[in-house]
Image (cartoon, rainbow, N blue to C red):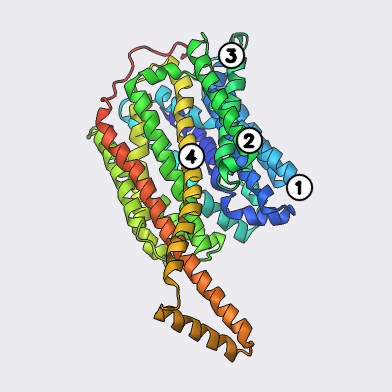
Amino acid sequence: MQQKVLAFATMCVGMFIALLDIQIVSASLRDIGGGLSAGADETVWIQTSYLIAEIIVIPMSGWLSRVFSTRWLFAGSAAGFTIASMLCGMAWDINSMIAFRALQGFIGGSMIPMVFTTAFYFFAGKQRVIAAATVGALASLAPTLGPTVGGWITDHFSWHWLFFINLVPGVFVAVVVPILVKIDRPNLNLIRDADYFGIVLMSLFLGCLEYTLEEGPRLDWFGDHVILTTAWISGLAGIGFIWRSLTYAHPIVDLRALKDRNFALGCFFSFVTGIGIFATIYLTPLFLGRVRGFSALEIGLAVFSTGVFQIMSIPLYSWLANRVDLRWLMMVGLAMFAVSMWNFAPITHDWGADQLMLPQALRGMGQQFAVAPTVTLTLGGLAPERLKLASGLFNLMRNLGGAIGIAACATLINDRTNLHFQRLAEHLNAGNEAMGQMLSGAGSSLLAWGVDAGSAQAGALRQLWTLAMREAQTQTFGDVFLCVMACFVIAFAMVPLMRKVAPPKAPSADAH
């Protein structure tokens, strides 16, 4: 048991750094772009390339682990991820950075679902509950801490260390995992019967979908011919991939597992929690940066409380999970997440770390109580020989939820900001006494500084525009948080459809 715990903990380190790197650059893109002499449009690809590569490899991880074994695939992924991280830190221009980030995401992405399957191979009973709680916590905690860690590193050292910090844990994982993890054996014969056409269809489907979702809000969606093209490719490839997976004898992804009610519902809940986790990671720093003007470090410190409360709730969840129906705990977690979004809704332009404390505390605890039972209820009832292929699909749904959630939030922010600004502007007319006083006071202040009358009037109008835009953006963030809340209310209502999980009777076909 000690060897299993150490092996599992080592694999968790690998999963954590792979998940952390999804968001670790988000607060530092401006610094990286400046260091590589790249514009804003180019630096966006530092994030997008990683996400596209990762979302392609995650559903393939089950098949890859059957081919090379969990032991060697995980060790190879950790070693490759470490090398790619070093190359990212040594990147000499934006093109090399984008290429190395894509390599980092593709190689490291397979570590994430393998930890989920290993938890169910290694442990049973109460130990399985604790392992699932740990995996669930890391899956939601790492992306949450990403902006905080990234902002602190960039402010105190340089953006290069966003990648160099992976070197020591990466080498440790690559060395220790082959020594301790002995779950299955490689089966290179699977390469001969692999569904390569299905791999191509899946890569086109997921890669183009991720690009469409990432770039769509920035490029006006289908008004851009590239977005329209990638959307069509994704849709057609997706239909072909589903058909291929359901008809081919040895598919890359086990879509037939969706016939199991718990697994299908679990994938839906994974999708919704992905929306909640990644959308709020996107929204909160965006608000603090745009409206409050916080630096990367200030943003990180303001959102840090989410991770603290999630960590504090792990012992409570582990204690309750062995005594209370997991479906009840999941309902509590989803409800807490929904209440958190409700508490975010009345946000004002002067909110900071103090005002964000309560909603972020609820969100942190909600993440733990929503994600961990979802893992157990979804994967705990599957036979071990199906677990690898199904785990990739389960993890894919969380990432897809995050991608779709962020894209929807970005679109809502653009549209609703314009709407709120127009509504506010309707009241800013000659009959508005408060507006007249504000303009008069601002103009007088500028005149006192020696500005001429025409420039003073223009400056006062600029201040009025800035004030109106700030309030329009603030109201918009409240609207978007309510939309996220609606997703969790729907998920909460669907939890009773899940059955109690029963561990599978059949042993693993390849375990020893």
Q: Residue 50: x and y, percent?
A: 61, 39
Q: Can residue 108 be seen in this view?
A: no
CA–CA distance in space, label 4 to label 3: 27 Å
10 Å neighbourhood of mark 1: few (<14), some, or many (≥20)?
A: some
CA–CA distance in space, label 1 to label 2: 20 Å
Determine whether the residue tagged by mark 4 lies in a helix, strand or loop. Answer: helix
Q: Residue 94: x and y, percent?
A: 73, 47
Residue 396 lies, with reference to residue 439, above or below; the image says above
What residue is pinned by disc 4? 404
Determine whether the residue tagged by mark 3 lies in a helix, strand or loop. Answer: loop
What residue is pinned by disc 1? 93
Q: Which of marks 1 and 4 is nearer the N terminus?
A: 1
Give the side of residue 117 with respect to residue 461, left or right: left
Say which residue appears at 30% left-offset and 30% top-offset.
126
Q: Which of marks 3 and 2 is nearer the N terminus?
A: 2
CA–CA distance in space, label 3 to label 2: 26 Å
Determine whether the residue tagged by mark 2 lies in a helix, strand or loop. Answer: helix
| Mark 4 residue type | Ile
Q: Earlier in the sequence, mark 4 or mark 3?
A: 3
Say which residue appears at 56% left-offset and 63% top-offset.
295
What residue is pinned by disc 2? 81
Q: Earlier in the sequence, mark 1 or mark 2?
A: 2
| Mark 2 residue type | Phe
